[in-house]
Amino acid sequence: MPGSRAKRRGAPSDPRVDALEVAVYRLPTDRPEADGTLSWDATTAVVVHASGGGVTGVGWTYADAAAATVVRGLLAGVVLGCPVLDPPAAASDMARAVRNAGAPGLVAMAISAVDVALWDLKARLLDVPLTGLLGAVRADAAVYASGGFTSYDDATTRDQLAGWLARGHDQAKIKIGESWGTAVPRDLARTRLAREVLGDDAALLVDANGGYTAKQAVRVGGELDDLGVVWFEEPVSSDDLAGLRLVRERLDCDVAAGEYGARLPDFAALCGAGAVDCLQVDASRCGGVTEWLRACAVAAGHQLEVSSHCVPALHAHLGPATPNLRHLEWFHDHERFERRLFDGVVEPAHGRVRPPADAPGLGLTVRSQDVEDLRIG
Ligand SMILES: [Mg+2]
């Protein structure tokens, strides 16, 4: 019977999850932000603490505050009593528990925050870094700086890119596809500006967030190829597998998508359709560490590399344990939020990040007193 093993009474050497708490924080952006298909002025983080065996782990997702309601209402009762040493047992029980609520989207984000907290808890209980618990493939991982919002004026874009170079980044991504693909001349002008600032010091990546139609993306992409762009993310909607494939086959630059993947079939569909050159996976959306590992294996089975989407303070610990990792996204909003929210955030250097070998779990502690003013739930 599902869950029966997880809920059986545990011996002292078999600690169980005995508390699950959730909090919501909202941090305004440092200036108005937009990509090709959305604009925003704040970021919301739903943060979960899971305890057991006298230890507490932390996990989080960038989701609407409603994800906290899902944690409290649908997941907490399922996870309490689960074995701390077996996060996949809780993941399996959570997946079953949300059948009628619908797994993708908000629910998957809530599950992700809990799953990450449970993996952090296990690693802390064993007093090992999460990367070490998973098994490191390499000591560090490549990162690319990410921001370059369509709402920025040229001076702001230039300053941000120059700042990244000064910090040693050698790969950088800007947003294009402004106003649902209706501002192509400005998209290309901003791409040329980025190319000029980065020079030969950094690779240039772009993300249209699904703002173009397929043939439009091919036309824009031809110009991007001429500018040496190496990565064209979501040239069309990630639901348009045929469109992604068309763009991929017609351009030199790599096509990437996957940031909305919430279930393994989402990733299998992208890979199986030949829609991407590199699969994006977000552990804070797809089901946490448990599903990150499986999604990356799906990509590996299709001879594809993966790249993490956002949440740098989390993925910094997963990347080095992922054999087919290309790089990690070092997203401006989340880097800023995580520095504010946590003590122990790891910083990249020379375009790479190395999780500390001596900090258990994710090595993060919520700066509770300092972020009380950001708390909204
Ligand atoms: Mg994206």
Image (tube, helix red, strand yellow):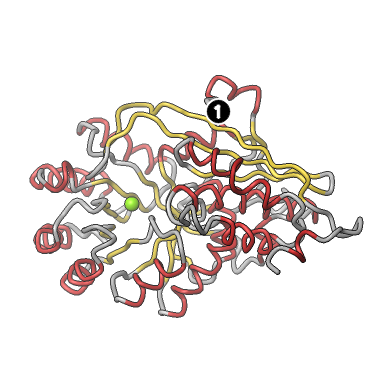
Q: Residues within 10 Å of mark 1 (few under 14, many from 20)?
A: few
* x and y percentages locating residue 208 in the rendered image: 23, 51
Report the residue at 21% width, 58% height from top. 236
* x and y percentages locating residue 95 in the rendered image: 57, 60
Question: Which residue is under mark 1?
Answer: 377
Quarter location, residue 345: top right
> What amino acid type should be assigned to the residue bearing mark 1?
Gly
Q: Is 65 on the left-hand or right-hand side of 226?
A: right
Report the residue at 55% width, 19% height from top. 373
Considering the image in quadrants, where does the N terminus appear? bottom right
Q: Is 298 on the left-hand or right-hand side of 57?
A: left
Where is 13 relative to 64, above or below? below
Q: Nearer the viewer, residue 189 or 322?
A: 322
* x and y percentages locating residue 186 in the rendered image: 12, 42
Q: Nearer the viewer, residue 21 or 42?
A: 21
Residue that extends furthest to the top in the rendered view of this protein = 373
Report the residue at 62% width, 37% height from top. 22
Q: Nearer the viewer, residue 6 or 357?
A: 6
* x and y percentages locating residue 353 in the rendered image: 54, 52
Where is 328 relative to 178, above or below? below
Considering the image in quadrants, where does the C terminus appear? top right
